[in-house]
Image (cartoon, rainbow, N blue to C red):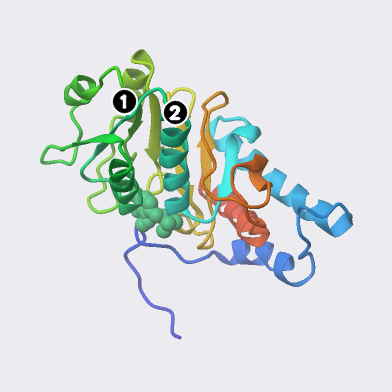
Amino acid sequence: MEKTRYFDHAATTYVKEDVLKEMLPYFELNYGNPSSIYKIGRENKRAIELARERVARVLNAKPKEIYFTGCGSESDNLAIKGVAYSNRNKRNHIITTKIEHNAVLETCEILEQEGFKVTYLGVDKNGKVSLEELENAITDSTILISIMTANNEIGTIQDIREIGEIAKRHNVIFHTDAVQAIGNIKIDVEQDNIDLLSLSAHKFYGPKGVGALYVKQGINFQKIQNGGHQEKNKRAGTENVAGIVGLRKSYKNRL
Ligand SMILES: Cc1ncc(COP(=O)(O)O)c(C=O)c1O
């Protein structure tokens, strides 16, 4: 196929040459299972931990707060269902917006069918959420606010830090889908008061099929996929090591 002029890098990006180069050995030579205790396994485990450190450093998080996933959609699902299910006996209200990606909207719809209450906030003509409306929507049963950092259709960037402040003030957990933001704007999870954050490598010149979820230490969330005990028993499945290595390299290039 010929090289094309492609202008929709919000949909996806190509994999940069140096990213691909870094990934290739993990398909051909260094293809061990990171859970194996012998050398080739341990080397793969080390590659994952280096990537975890990199992602953590850029977000101003701790490595143990980073969980690798299969994509941005999975990170959103894990964040929202994970928090909702692990707190369902205490509180059952979630606040989100009408302009979230389907990974958030459909997840919230499923949770509604399971008995959770969801408020879908509207936005103004520029796609902005009103902070006043957000604060007014919080009730004693609100457990989670999930509002995207940057919109995938019109590019609106929300007032994430202020949203995080409101969440903190009301003792509500704050998740942001930052899939469109990471690689383009600087996010500091501490300063921006973010409890959970989703990202996906194919939006910043990394490979498809690999994402990450930041979860602040101390936030309870339940795994939604059962099986192996990878990713501190929060995400079952043999890790996509080549993808994770690609994510690390593309992350380094962009920020
Ligand atoms: C805002 C937003 N969230 C989530 C996703 C899903 O990411 P992925 O394609 O890695 O599942 C996308 C992808 O377009 C997106 O733009």
Asked if residue 56 is positioned above or below residue 72 in the image, the reply reads above
Identify the residue at horizontal 35%, vertical 13% (top origin). Answer: 169
Q: Nearer the viewer, mark 1 or mark 2?
A: 2
Q: Amino acid at mark 2?
A: Asn
Residue 221, position as x, y percentages in the image: 51, 34
Using a 10 Å C-alpha cutoff, classify the residue at mark 1 as few (fewer than 14 neighbours), some (14 to 19) or many (20 or more). Answer: many
Instruction: Tell me which corner region of the image, top left, top right, bottom left or bottom right, holds residue 167.
Output: top left
Residue 87, position as x, y percentages in the image: 44, 28
Q: Which mark is residue 87?
A: 2
Residue 77, position as x, y percentages in the image: 43, 47
Instruction: Tell me which corner region of the image, top left, top right, bottom left or bottom right, holds residue 240.
Output: bottom right
Quadrant placement of the N terminus = bottom left
The answer to whether residue 2 is left or right of residue 19 is: left
Farthest residue toward the left? 125
The answer to whether residue 142 is left or right of residue 51 is: left
Does mark 2 have its CB less than 8 Å from ligand 1?
no
| Number of numbered labels in the structure image | 2
The residue tagged 1 is 163
Q: Amino acid at mark 1?
A: Ile
The answer to whether residue 52 is left or right of residue 90 is: right
